[in-house]
Amino acid sequence: MFKVVYDTNVVVSGLLSSRGIPALLLDLVSNKRVSLVLSSDIFNEYADVLRRPKFNLPKRQRDSVLRHLRNLADWVEPNQRISVAKDPDDNIILECAVAGQVDYLVTGNLRHFPKSIRQIPIVSPRQFLDNYLRSIAEDEI
């Protein structure tokens, strides 16, 4: 099972539209096909962004999703500061990925990140889904 960190934009996109790859990636977590790794900083960012009025998410739905993610996640507490992202706010995503020794960091905003961090590939939702599907196909052979 892949261990992943999803950038906030992947979670928000997956919640705003039930169609599309980000929604599929959330389903992979819900169905325990991949393991979502979270830190308290990332979870708080998810919550803050999902509360923004522009997303118009009903409180009940938002709280339900956050509770679901909190219960499913593997939690880490990063103990190392990283400062390599173009957007300094994105460094918490990198710190969580390193602390959780994940297989992938998935973001819809590749331009803000290096191509990898400590040998952890940083990929788009499409790239991750392709890799996930490829790994399933290889397991069946």
Image: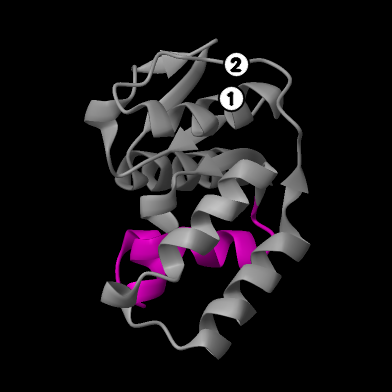
How many labels, in total?
A: 2
On whether residue 20 falls in the magenta region, the answer is: yes
Q: Which label number is shown at residue 67? A: none
What residue appears at the point 44 percent right and 44 percent down from the top-left corner? 7
Query: Could you give the CA–CA distance between mark 1 and mark 2, rounded to whole angstroms?
Result: 6 Å
The residue pinned by badge 1 equals 95
Prevailing secondary structure of the magenta residues: helix
For the residues bearing labels 1 and 2, Cβ distance under 8 angstroms: yes
One can see residue 38 in this view: no
The residue pinned by badge 2 equals 81
From this view, report whether residue 45 is shown above or below residue 107: below
State the image coordinates of residue 28 (x, y, percent, origin top left): 56, 60
Q: Earlier along the polypeptide chain: callout 1 or callout 2?
A: 2
On whether residue 38 falls in the magenta region, the answer is: no
| Element under disc 1 | helix
Q: How is the image coloured?
A: one colour
- Point out the stretch of residues depicted in magenta: 12-34
Q: Say left or right for 109 vs 79.
A: left
Which residue is at the far top? Answer: 118
